[in-house]
Amino acid sequence: MTLLQGLRSALTSLLANKMRSFLTMLGVIIGVAAVIVVVAIGEGLKADVMQRIQGLGTNLLMISPSSRRGPHGPVSRPGRLTDEDWEALEANVTNVSALAPTVQGSASIKYRNRTHSSRVLGSTPDIVTVQNLALAAGRFFTASEQRSRARVVVLGSTVVEELFYGRALLEETVRIKGVPFQVIGVLEEKGGSWGSPDDQVYIPLSTARQRILGQSNLSTIYISAASTKVVTEVEESVTQVLRRQHRVRNEEDDFRIRSQAEILTTMSETSATLTRFLAGIALVSLLVGGVGIMNIMLVSVAERTREIGIRKAVGARRRDILTQFLIESTALSVIGGIIGSIIGIGISRLVGSGLGWTTVVPPWAILVAFLFAAVVGIFFGYYPSRKAALLDPIECLRYE
């Protein structure tokens, strides 16, 4: 029996029991579709995060307070960042294009009868350069407004959508924790769901400290290195300055420095690991589908015992019987894989358009799911096929 003859015979047998064949393939269809959808969501999330991080630039350093252990035990002492640290960094660290201290917190923002909870970030005008912000309308606050504690605010695109129905109403007054602020600018939509400036409002650092958040210490200091080549040099210089400022000698640092490149690598690795883990769980349903294929093939062998006996009587070899049934089981799995791939791609696009998520279906996900489905068909179809091939032709012809 040639491969083409075996395939024709297998398709004829499958089409003779359409409903049973479809129900047998259902486990494979669900498994392949689940793998593709999970990978598409995971890859989309990864692309979303990467776009957001890369939008800030890979030469960005973020300095934040950290806890350190005490000299006589594991008791941690919280660190802090102060204005003196900010001034020391400005005076002593070179190869820096911009430096922006910040205080951050959440607050309720109200315009007339509409209220939206958002993140408030108080900083200096250098935050525009550091975070690579772009204005859709208006302007950013100035250094003089920062020093005079002016009540001016720049809104992210999501906040504008929630409060003004998407209209950039400059010179309007919004209330942040009950304090009136004049809208002087609106940021361009940046996209992304992780740490996006779209759902943030920016106000002068001095105003945020005195009128809104009441924080004397800094939350984060952002430093933009002059180029990606000097990021390591700037990070080492920042570490030396802050250790001197905090009088740290043989103890651990009470601050933490993170770079965008480090976050980019970490997020990429974490996302890839999570996607593989979830895809592995989804592949379990393919194994369940394989058990279904084995079960139905055993039933098929029992139903076609006389047919097997007749084939052997007219000269069919064991190898021919084995090939015929193995092609049938593989065809069930492969056809189920094709249908599952189509359904998985369709569901991924529906999820992306319906929920507004970014979904990416990489070709390797379809290939892996498809190959795994074929392997499942061969693996779980081999035992029933071998059982059929080893049947005694005389006993088969006597079978009722």
Image: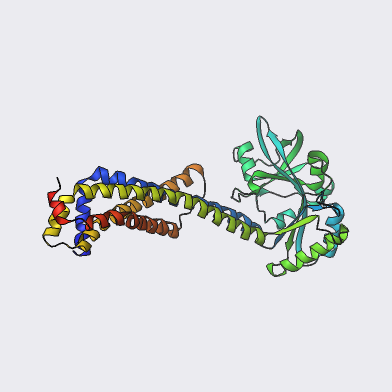
Would you say 350 lies left or right of 194 here?
left
Pick the front one: 394 or 214: 394
Residue reaching furthest bottom?
229
Q: Is residue 229 above or below residue 286?
A: below
**Rendered-image quadrant of the N terminus:** bottom left
The answer to whether 243 appears left or right of 112 in the picture is: right
Is residue 119 at all visible to an observer of this figure? yes
Looking at this view, is 134 or 268 the one in front? 268
Q: Quadrant of the C terminus?
A: top left
Residue 23 vs residue 54, the one in the foreground: 23
From this viewpoint, which residue is outermost toward the left?
314
The percent position of residue 126, horizontal first and vertical second, equals 75, 55
Q: Residue sitting at 51 percent across and 55 percent down?
A: 276
Q: Position of residue 74 (x, y in %)?
A: 80, 51
Task: From the viewer's perspective, tell me whether residue 121 is left or right of residue 376.
Answer: right
Q: Going by the image, does 344 lie left or right of 209?
A: left
From this view, report whether residue 93 is shown above or below residue 9: below
Q: Which image quadrant is residue 376 in?
A: bottom left
Residue 37 in sight here:
no
**Residue occupying the far top of the picture:** 113
Quarter of the image for residue 150 reads top right
Residue 260's spot in the image, x, y percent?
67, 59
Which sits in the foreground, 228 or 256? 256
- Residue drawn at the location 42% of the way across and 46% of the way down: 347
